[in-house]
Image (cartoon, rainbow, N blue to C red):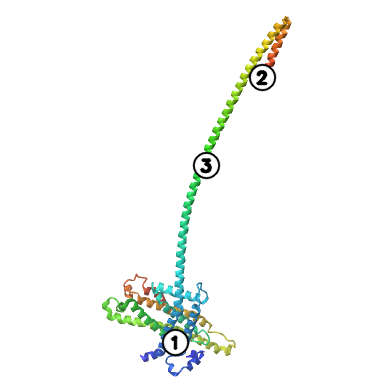
Amino acid sequence: MHEEHGSWLKPIADLLPASWHGFVDIYVLNAWLVMLILVLLALAGTRRRRRVPSGLQNAWEMYVLFVRDFCRDQIGPGAEKYAPLLGTLFVYILFMNLFGLIPGFITPTMSINVTAALALCVFLAVQYFGFAEQGLGYLMHFVGEPWWLFPINIPVHVIGELAKPLSLAVRLFGNMFGEETAIFRMAALGAAILPFIYVPVPVQFINVLLHLIIGPIQAFIFFILSAAYIEIATTSHGHEEHEEDDTHQESPEHAFAPAEQAA
Amino acid sequence: MGELFEALGLEPGILLVNMAGFVLLVLLLKRFAFGPIGDILAERAREVEADLEEAERVRQMALADRRAMAEELGKLDERGREIVSKAEDDAEQRRAEILRRADEQSRRIADEGRRSVELAEAEARQRLREETADIAVAVSERALREATDEQRQAALVDAFIEDIERIARKEGDTR
């Protein structure tokens, strides 16, 4: 990939033993760097906690409050326990999406391995939370209603459940890969026309601005859809119930419908 | 499966490392960000709640104090009214007493004046009577002693009348 050669972490990747190549690539290194930055920011923000917050502590408090309020509003009372997972997911994806804008680094989320890993984590967490909240009753999500249609419902719902991480992973990967590729191509175009116009023109500038918008949006979509999946899995009123009741507007699917449509 | 992964560009090893990295990041951020910040927020919520409770307690105390003060003020007001009322009654009584004494004193002074006037008048009448008698006796003695003529008798009578008028004038001036 073109970004691998432009990354400052490429020499480190080259130093890795051959046995590591199946586990660590340049995207993983960039993702680890993002993780390191986030952990350092967390440490810096909470090292000396003060009664009246300021600086990084203030930012972290605002962020944690935002995530907790979001969980409580969208998933329900007591959903603050999902805040660490969802909050980490959002800030991690956001930083990774924007990381490629720093010269010398690449966007880890333009690797399907990174986005698929995140989507798989969400998928496994959703299944875990579903069983933890509802026990074996969670399986009724797959049986659906009427129950005697289970031979059809179960495969359909299993496919739907598996499609969730797939859609999460491919959506994020496609958007970020497309954006990064567009920026790279436009930058290459700028370099190509330089011998003719003698003035360097940042033709990729618009794409960079677009990336600044799309990066947070994609992170938020991943975040909000993950919250929706958790909400669907942890609430006892299955989506089958409100398929029967069209007037039930507070259902999880309805609540998150605009986000899914937007995604 | 391997072909599907390869077609999608997925590498199981890298996938697992990324998943492990994400799980590790969740744990680290929970340990260093969400946990401590959650503790701070919870502590602040407790403090705010305690402050609100304290404020409510102080407000209730202030309300109780205000009620007690209003009650005390009412009592003081009542007492003040009683004092003023008593003072007015006392003043009224004293005024009546003073008026009564003044009236009595004026009446006594008037009675005394009237009595002294009557006494002086009686004394004056008595003295006039005595002096008139003395003059009459004196004139008679003089008339007998001198055995005078008519002309002289007339002069004596005139002198007697002048004496009487003089005494009467004198008495009038004295009164």
Same chain? Circles 2 and 3: yes
Q: Is residue B140 above or below residue A160?
A: above
Say few, some or many: other residues with alpha carbon within 10 Å of mark 1 (under 14 / 14 to 19 / 20 or more): many
x, y percent for residue B166: 69, 16
Residue A83 seen in render: yes
Say few, some or many: other residues with alpha carbon within 10 Å of mark 2 (under 14 / 14 to 19 / 20 or more): few
Which badge, 2 or 3, is on the more N-terminal residue?
Answer: 3
Measure the C-alpha gap from mark 3 to mark 1. Answer: 101 Å
* Callout 2–callout 1 Cβ contact below 8 Å: no
Q: Nearer the viewer, mark 3 or mark 1?
A: 3
Q: Is residue A91 above or below residue A25?
A: above
Task: Answer with the quarter of the image where residue B23 lies.
Answer: bottom left
Chain assignment, label 3: B
Helix, strand or loop for disc 3: helix
Q: Which residue is mark 1?
A: A111
Q: Which residue is mark 3?
A: B87
Helix, strand or loop for disc 2: helix
Helix, strand or loop for disc 1: loop
Q: Which residue is mark 2?
A: B172
Chain assignment, label 1: A
